[in-house]
Image: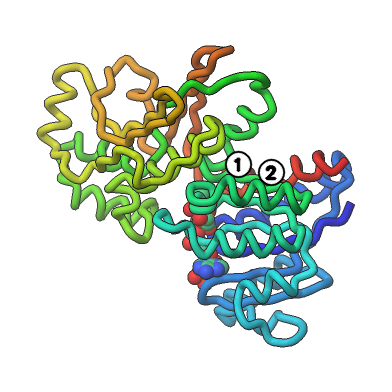
Amino acid sequence: MLYKMALIGFGNVGKSFIRLLERKRSSLRKDYGIECRVVAIATGRHGLAIEPRGFQSKKVFTHLEKHGSLDALHRGKPLKDVIDLIQRSPANVMFEISPQNPWTGQPAIRHIKAALKKKMHVVTANKGPVVHAYRQLRRLAARSKVQFRHEGVVMDGTPIFNLAEMTLPATEVRGFEGILNATTNYLLEEMEKKKNLEAALEEAKAMGIVESNPAVDVEGWDATSKLCCLANVIMGADIRPSQVDREGIQNLTPERLLDARDRGYCIRLLVRAWRDGRHVRGSVKPAEIPLTHTFATLRGDTTALCIDTDTMEKITIIEGPGGPHQTAFGLLSDFINIHRGTQ
Ligand SMILES: NC(=O)c1ccc[n+]([C@@H]2O[C@H](COP(=O)([O-])OP(=O)(O)OC[C@H]3O[C@@H](n4cnc5c(N)ncnc54)[C@H](OP(=O)(O)O)[C@@H]3O)[C@@H](O)[C@H]2O)c1
């Protein structure tokens, strides 16, 4: 089966994904009968291009490095914008991997709607659409008889949504708690070494692990987005960030963290969701966690989620150091599941 792919966003994740596809090409063919070509790529400031015969990945990388834009690789009438690219591309599966907008989910929601209306399958690692439009996008996908998948939105490619969907049949998720933002873990660990938040943040920025707007990490917006994604999908909720009881780490001091340590606790940004009658409630707050708890043993770049179910009780999943490579795997696993669903 031949899949023609459109990539909306070609940053760390998009580039890792193309490399992963190259690396897995023969196994995709042999194990699944999948052939795939990337036929369209959109960026924000580095151009847009459609190549109906499929891009050669090496050429895309060298061209982008040399010219800073993909525009010259485009074949056909000039493209107006990303929606124009989606509408004119011959792709049958689109990967939405543009930057997240935790407050509105746009423009990714518009991109995904345009693709679903064109009967393209859609895979995203962008939290915004799952936070703000999950039900609507699922309905649209069902009407178009295509799939909308999003494994990469929480804990990169670690199977969370697929685990719940495919391996926990007839199960109610009663709630969950987790440490889902690795950057705040790192910041809090550094503050335990008596650094103030500003100094720890400067270090984290130099390491490239802070969102371009640091408030997204520090004020808990990223963790809140992840909470909404999980609650909306695995608990059937329909909640938005404004309904989550959110408090970031900006008011914590090294003294407060060290005081907790002396009493046998560490402070981490804890994400929690629970059922309250017919409603699902959520909170994202710094919490004191006993040093003997699994969550307290996580290193700065590690995340964990504990799901509370009515069949298996508690299941805890830990992801080691994550990043674009793991997120690229999330896209690949969704893509293969789409293929399985069409067989
Ligand atoms: N990095 C990770 O490990 C990770 C993990 C989980 C989820 N995610 C999610 O995956 C997505 C991509 O992450 P990333 O690390 O690849 O981000 P990134 O490196 O910042 O790349 C974003 C890409 O999107 C492009 N872009 C910007 N605005 C766009 C628009 N309006 N339409 C189309 N493309 C646009 C950018 O182009 P320009 O550079 O030209 O502006 C760039 O190519 C994000 O939503 C992120 O939250 C990432």
Q: Earlier in the sequence, mark 1 or mark 2?
A: 1
- Which of the 4 image quadrants contains residue 263? top left
Question: Mark on residue 334?
Answer: 2
Q: How far across and how far down the image is residue 291, in percent?
A: 28, 18
For mark 2, give the secondary structure.
helix
Q: Position of 41 compared to 44: left or right?
A: right
Q: Position of 309 compared to 122: left or right?
A: left
The amino acid type found where label 2 is placed reads Asp
**Closest to the observer, 82 or 47:** 82
1 versus 289 height, above or below: below
At x 57% / y 58%, what residue is drawn?
Answer: 97
169 versus 199 height, above or below: above
**Residue behind mark 1:** 151
Q: How far across and how far down the image is residue 212, in percent?
A: 37, 60
The amino acid type found where label 1 is placed reads Glu
Screen quadrant of the C terminus: top right
Q: For the residues marked 1 and 2, what is the alpha-carbon distance in whole angstroms?
A: 7 Å
Mark 1 Cβ inside 8 Å of ligand 1: no
Q: Position of 341 compared to 227: left or right?
A: right
At x 58% / y 12%, what residue is drawn?
Answer: 311
For mark 1, give the secondary structure.
helix
- Crowd band around label 1 with a 10 angstrom C-alpha radius: few (<14), some (14–19), many (20+): many
Q: How far across and how far down the image is residue 133, in percent?
A: 54, 51
